[in-house]
Image (tube, helix red, strand yellow):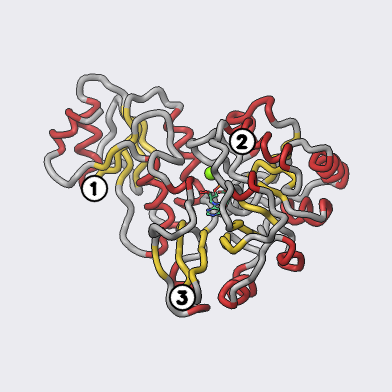
Amino acid sequence: MVRVVRATQVEIDTAVQALRDGELVAFPTETVYGLGANATNPAAVRKIFAAKGRPADHPVIVHLDSPRFLHRWVREVPEAATKLAERFWPGPLTMVMARAANVHDVVTGGQDTVAIRVPSHPMAQQLLTAFGGGIAAPSANRYGRLSPTRAEHVRDELGDSVNTILDGGETQIGLESTIVTFEGSNVRLLRPGAVTAGQIRTVIGELLIGANLESPRVPGSTSSHYAPTTPMTVVPAGEIDAHAASLSEGGRRVAVLAQRLPLKSHKYVTWVNAGRRPEQYGHDLYANLRTLDKAGCTQILVQDVPEGEKWDAIRDRLMRAASSVSESGDAGAMAVLP
Ligand code: TXA
Ligand code: MG
């Protein structure tokens, strides 16, 4: 069981004061930790980009404690959005909608849309309610790196550039929120997450999948994202042992993220068994990749995950984190991999 802790009143007061002073506050959500700033203060939001090393045209999500002040941020709330909010908020769903006139460009990346989420984590709720406004927050990692799922990951990633970190323990879900956008009466999935396409369809009927040319840009969805520094390859499930054995033959250290134990142990292989349950696998994914990234290996091999909707968000993040994907075939061919 993941322990969910609440913040003390002193911690919340300190964090709210920091936000009012235009400072950054890192806080837990049920997905990953966010790096927050007062969304109505452009200078404060710019500090997020500086701390992350993130390009200025990347929009950030505005977090609210409930939909009650949605109209301050969104020009027109589509009918489908109202239905999705009723079903999934508070929770791991982000909705990209037409922005209200006074929403700052630094929040939207200059686009005509704004992304809104109402997180369910008790500490995020405490903070948002006490602050009383919108908190702009991307994941609290350096640009392009793995999202943090524990407070110490935030410290590792951002060090001194954020003074206030609310520690809510491990995040429950471990993968970033599902993102949808609206095109007329259609709804389009831009990023898979814990709220699945099937769950969304039960509420609104049809759902389009994946960005198209007219979709709002989702810069975090470019490839080479959410990535460890060690080169990472996704390997067909049945070939993981053979690949690990052949790569480590000459004494090269290899890290493996698999869904079972190794068939036999290899001297130079660090093997993590992440299990076969998608909820647990997703919860642990970024922490596991951080561990393997620090294991001093020349290569991370990831056993490809099963088909099926419950694995969609995990497969999506693995493909973005991977520097290459190995085709099924002769394990010996691995020798030519980076
Ligand atoms: O679970 C989450 O969503 C976490 C927690 C902290 O809420 N946040 C998160 O933020 O993952 P970030 O910035 O790492 O990813 C948000 C994604 C980015 O790919 C960004 O480009 C996209 O949402 N996004 C934000 N505003 C947008 C907009 N107006 N139009 C299109 N995409 C937008
Ligand atoms: Mg991110």
Identity of the residue drawn at 30% across and 25% down: 268
Q: Nearer the viewer, residue 252 or 154?
A: 154
In the image, farthest residue toward the top: 251
Which percent across, then down, holds residue 178? 51, 59
Q: How far separated are the C-alphas under marks 2 and 1?
A: 37 Å
Q: Quadrant of the C terminus?
A: top left
Tell whether circle 2 marks a residue whose Cβ is less than 8 angstroms from ligand 1. no
Which percent across, then down, holds residue 52? 59, 33
Q: Which mark is residue 201?
A: 3
Mark in the foreground, 2 or 1: 2
Query: Label 3 neighbourhood size at 10 Å, few (<14), some (14-19), many (20+)?
Result: some
Q: Nearer the viewer, residue 309 or 142?
A: 142
Identity of the residue drawn at 72% across and 55% down: 102
Q: Amino acid at mark 3?
A: Arg
Tell whether circle 1 marks a residue whose Cβ is less than 8 angstroms from ligand 2. no
**N-term-proximal mark, 3 vs 2:** 2
Q: Which mark is residue 49?
A: 2
Question: Does any portion of residue 219 appear in the rendered image?
Answer: yes
Q: Which residue corresponds to mark 1?
A: 236
Relative placement, left or right, of 299 versus 23 is left
229 above or below 317? Answer: above
Q: How far separated are the C-alphas under marks 3 and 1?
A: 30 Å
Query: Label 1 neighbourhood size at 10 Å, few (<14), some (14-19), many (20+)?
Result: some
Which percent across, then down, holds residue 23? 77, 36
